[in-house]
Amino acid sequence: MKKYTDVGTDIEKVKQQNANSGMSYNEVKEYLAKTMAQNPPSSDSMEIRRK
């Protein structure tokens, strides 16, 4: 039996679409924080950003 919200949204379909949508905003933030901690930007790349 399918579950629907009061307005008729198929809950299982939404869950499936979310599973296929890629990383969430918070997952991206966590990934970038870990990546930047392991590989901090060099002073050369910081200089390029200022230009």
Image: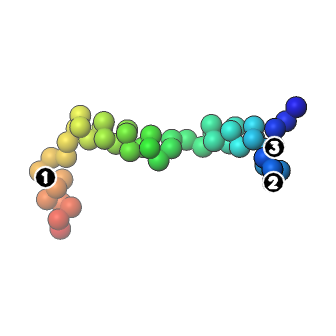
Q: Secondary structure at mark 3?
A: loop
Q: What residue occupies the far front of the structure in this picture?
A: 6
Q: Secondary structure at mark 2?
A: loop
Residue position marked by numbered label 3 in the rendering: 4
Please rate how many residues cluster around mark 3, counting C-alpha atoms within 10 Å: few if below 14, some from 14 to 19, many from 20. few
**Which marked residue is nearer to the observer: mark 2 or mark 1?**
2
Which quadrant holds residue 21?
top right
Q: What residue occupies the far right of the structure in this picture?
A: 1
**Which marked residue is nearer to the observer: mark 3 or mark 1?**
3
How far from the left and from the top, in percent, is residue 15? Answer: 68, 38
In the rendered structure, the answer to whether residue 15 lies left or right of residue 2 reads left
Q: CA distance from mark 2 to mark 1?
A: 54 Å
**Residue at horizontal 63 percent and vertical 42 percent from the top:** 18
Please rate how many residues cluster around mark 1, counting C-alpha atoms within 10 Å: few if below 14, some from 14 to 19, many from 20. few
Sequence-earlier tag: 2 or 1: 2
- Image quarter of the N terminus: top right
Q: Secondary structure at mark 1?
A: helix
Q: CA distance from mark 3 to mark 1?
A: 54 Å
Q: CA distance from mark 3 to mark 2?
A: 8 Å
Q: Amino acid at mark 2?
A: Val
Residue position marked by numbered label 1 in the rendering: 44
**Residue at horizontal 55 percent and vertical 41 percent from the top:** 22
In the rendered structure, the answer to whether residue 12 lies left or right of residue 21 reads right
Residue position marked by numbered label 2 in the rendering: 7
Which quadrant holds residue 16?
top right
Q: Nearer the viewer, residue 32 or 7?
A: 7
How far from the left and from the top, in percent, is residue 27? Answer: 44, 40
The reply to whether callout 3 and callout 1 are in contact (CB within 8 Å) is no
User: From the viewer's perspective, is residue 37 above or below residue 46?
Assistant: above
Q: Nearer the viewer, residue 5 or 38?
A: 5
**Residue at horizontal 11 percent and vertical 51 percent from the top:** 43
Q: What residue occupies the far left of the structure in this picture?
A: 43
